[in-house]
Amino acid sequence: MITYLLDDTDISPRVQTVLAQADALIERGHDVRIVTTADGPVTWRASRAAWELVDDLDPRGADVSSALRGRDVRAPHIILDDTFPWSDFLIVDDAMYRPRTPREHEPLRVLLDGPGVANGYGAAAHARWFHQAFELIRVSPWAPSREEPLDSVQEFHVALTTPEMTRLMHSCDLLIAPEPGLRSAEAMAAGVPVVSVEEENAVELGERLIEILGDEELRDRLRERGREAAEQWRAGRVVARLESFLRIP
């Protein structure tokens, strides 16, 4: 039995990864349960896992033990919590993958999401200072705060379900990814070039954005390389690595 401990079920890369891993493990015949202190199962993504609601996530506590009661104690018992290296086992849903990309928009649609969003806004402002024309599309789990420079955004999307996020990604031409993660992996799978740099530097990120905006052939090469790299995040491949990492048959 494989048990995930989740302190919340809000929209986030970690929760999305948990759900994708759970579904992939169930597909391969494993028994998976998600134990959470949240109000209940997620509504923004489908899930095949069994769910248990508890008051305390201590793996040694009575709440978690009660949630697991009735299972075959002879079966392997693995608990995955905050100490698990989630970023090493990202899964991109099959619906996000595209073998071909439709014609680009005019002007190009640039998606901004994920951590380091302030650097992303700075990069967009830098590119526009140098007369680059594009539409900036922002997506976030939450409504915009007062710090969000909404006058620089053409669209702001909040709390999208997984299918809605897939449609949005497929409607964009570039992704600004100030920090690598699940969203950049999804973009590569979708054939959307990713604008990123190694260090947190808005100006350098903006220079990279200018370079990619102005070079159609570069965008085509990034799409091709991205699709090749994204194959590592297919559910079947990831769960095979996960089984090996957890040493389960």
Image (spheres, helix red, strand yellow):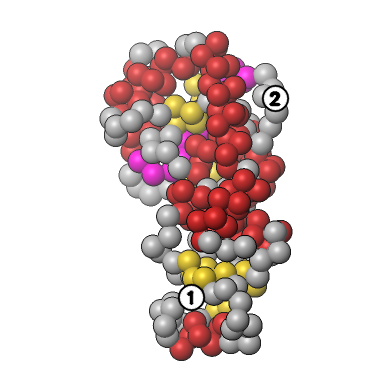
Disc number placed over residue 37 in the picture, else none: 1
Q: Residue at x 45, y 49 (%)?
A: 87
Q: Please tell me which residue is depicted at 53% across the width and 21% down the height of the picture.
A: 222
Between 54 and 151, the residue placed more toward the observer is 54
Would residue 240 be found to the left or right of residue 212 on screen?
Answer: right
Residue 232 tag number: none
Distance between the Cα atoms at labels 1 and 2?
Answer: 41 Å
Kind of element beneath mark 1 = loop
Under mark 1, the amino acid is Thr
Q: Which mark is residue 100?
A: 2
Quadrant position of the C terminus in the picture = bottom right
Packing grade of label 2 (10 A; few <14, some 14-19, many >=20) is few
Q: Nearer the viewer, residue 158 or 113?
A: 113
Amino acid type at circle 2 is Arg
- Magenta stretch: give its range: 104-116
Q: Position of residue 20 (x, y in %)?
A: 61, 55
Task: Looking at the picture, tell me which residue is in the foreground, 85 or 8.
Answer: 85
Examine the rendered structure and indicate whether residue 131 appears above or below residue 155.
above
Q: Say which quarter of the image contains residue 171.
A: top right
Between discs 1 and 2, the one toward the N terminus: 1
* Whole-percent x, y for residue 158 in the image: 53, 49
The secondary structure type at the circle numbered 2 is loop
Whether residue 37 is visible here, answered yes or no, is yes
For the stretch drawn in magenta, what is the main secondary structure? loop
Residue drawn 55% across and 24% down? 225
Is residue 105 highlighted in magenta? yes
| Neighbourhood count class around disc 1 (C-alpha, 10 Å): few under 14, some 14–19, many 20 upward | some
Quadrant, the N terminus: bottom right
